[in-house]
Image: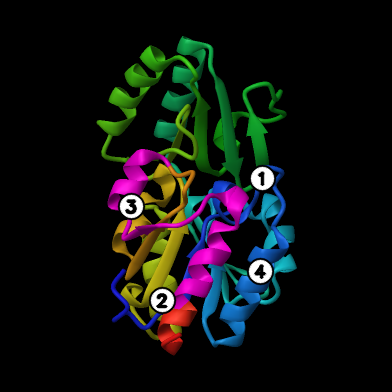
Amino acid sequence: MNMEHNIKLIALDMDGTLLRDDHDISEENRKAVQRAKDEGIHVVVSTGRPIARSKHIIESLGESEYAVTVNGGEIYDRHYNLVERQVLEMTEVKRLWELQQEHSIRLWTSTVQGAFDSDYTFEKPIDEYDWLKIGFEVPDESIREVILKEVTANPALEVTNSSPVNIEINPAGVSKAAALHKVSDWLGFSINEVMAVGDSLNDMAMIKEAGIGVAMGNAQDEVKKEADLVTKSNMEDGVAEVIHRIIDAKAGV
């Protein structure tokens, strides 16, 4: 780990990173986040979840200048006012729904109007919703490869995942990294002064572009390969371990 970076912001993924498998935050992680804040370091949650499914967790950590949600599709300020939003083009949305029909797979969504999945009976036509992100759950590897081949070839889409068996799709250019570039700029420093921690492909860009990129012990192998270091797993307080490590190193402990 290059300790020349003066870390001013720590960006934390939620599921598989900050949260244990029971979707709660350990006491050790809470204490470490508070220690970072006491040291004057910004702590920003950077999640694939929409704000409705992440706000209670973000709030439980105390005040934060910003929150990055839906893989960077939305950015909120400290009062949970929307700062920026990017939605999928309707042409792309309709094709993604066609793929769901063709392959009979579970689809889930984050829209401005709420979160839905393919079991939901829509009250309005789909073009009356604003689509932030669409995800597919595809346990069958051969079907997953077929879908990935199509969506990754589409320059209008940003394709990642939050588990090895799913596919997450945002508008092109939308990522946690792109959002953190903006947040860092608004706060008066660069992404080189950010430590980003995550476990899945939707964390890959921020891990690669941050000053210090950290993969969880439970991270996908591709993510670990791109990280500057690998911490313990989400069940072993890996977030706390790396926060203490970075602060101790800064203090010369």
User: Dot 1, crowdedness within 10 Å: few (<14), some or many (≥20)?
Assistant: few
Image quarter where the C terminus lies is bottom left
Give, as a three-letter code, the residue at label 1: Gln
The residue that label 3 is drawn on is 173
Residue 81 among magenta residues: no
Give, as a three-letter code, the residue at label 2: Ser
Give, as a three-letter code, the residue at label 4: Tyr
Task: Check residue 184 in the rendering and tell me which mark sits there, or answer none.
Answer: 2
In terms of image quadrants, where is residue 4? bottom left
Choose mark 2 or mark 3, whichever is in front.
2
The residue that label 4 is drawn on is 80
Circle 3 SS class: loop
The residue that label 1 is drawn on is 113
The magenta segment: 220-246
User: Quick check: can you spot residue 64?
Assistant: yes
Earlier-in-chain disc, 4 versus 1: 4
User: Dot 3, crowdedness within 10 Å: few (<14), some or many (≥20)?
Assistant: some
Choose mark 3 or mark 1, whichever is in front.
3
Identify which residue is drawn at 61% across, 29% down.
125
Choose mark 1 or mark 2, whichever is in front.
2
* Spot occupied by residue 50 in the image (x, y as percentages of width and height): 61, 50
Whether the residues at callouts 3 and 1 have beta carbons within 8 Å, the answer is no
Query: Would residue 115 be found to the left or right of residue 4 on screen?
Result: right
Give, as a three-letter code, the residue at label 3: Gly
